Image (cartoon, rainbow, N blue to C red):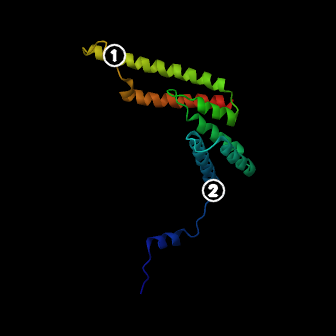
Amino acid sequence: MAEIKSTIDLIMERTKDLSASPQEREAWHRQEREKRIRGLVQRLLDNSLTIDGVRDELDKERKSGHVAEAMGHLKNALALHVDPESDNERLFRIVTELVGTPGERLQDTLRSCQAEYFARKTALAERQREGLESQGIAGSAVLPNPEADPQWKALREQMQAACSKRLLEVINS
């Protein structure tokens, strides 16, 4: 009588001789390091990890010979958390302590991003106001709401990414 095999048995039987190539293993390890560093940054920003804890993790990476890659991931993860609409002082303190980028350079870059950000938001609000006036809706109580505009949401994401990119350039320089 034939033996009935489970799906897992069939899969295991067919894949028993498969293994990852060294390049695939290295790519997997690189992705895992990046995820771990992003997690460390998130925990640091959530106050569930101290800067010393991050330094300890970077020391482990230094001992394993991957500190340059880990620092690149750290810089990228920190730059992605900049927000032109909120207070970034704590983020900048963390960047200064871990990476050594002067806080004033970070502030100057953020001010430039914020100026562009608010100029575009104001221009969109003005276009909305003109659109309402053309429909006969006007008055001192009429306030356009750029936050509700789908165009603004897409533009905000683009500007956020551009600001993060500019900040990363400052951090890397």
2 horizontally vs 165: left or right: left
Residue type at tag 2: Arg
Q: Is residue 65 above or below residue 12?
A: above
Tell me the element at label 1: helix
Q: Which quadrant holds residue 111?
A: top right
Residue sitting at x 31%, y 17%: 142
Q: Which quadrant holds residue 104?
A: top right
What x and y, as percent, mark residue 44? 60, 41
Circle 2 residues within 10 Å: few <14, some 14–19, many ≥20: few
| Quadrant in the picture for the N terminus | bottom left
Residue type at tag 1: Arg
The tally of labels here is 2
What x and y, as percent, mark residue 155? 44, 27
| Quadrant in the picture for the C terminus | top right
Residue sitting at x 38%, y 24%: 146
Residue at image mark 2: 25
Residue sitting at x 46%, y 28%: 156
Tell me the element at label 2: helix
Disc on the earlier residue, 2 or 1: 2
- Disc 2 and disc 1: Cα gap in Å? 56 Å
What x and y, as percent, mark residue 147? 39, 27
Residue at image mark 1: 129
119 horizontally vs 56: left or right: left
Q: Residue furthest bottom?
A: 1
Circle 1 residues within 10 Å: few <14, some 14–19, many ≥20: many
> 161 or 59: nearer the eye?
59
Q: Residue furthest top?
A: 139
Which of pointers 2 and 1 indicates the residue nearer the eye?
A: 1
Residue sitting at x 61%, y 60%: 20
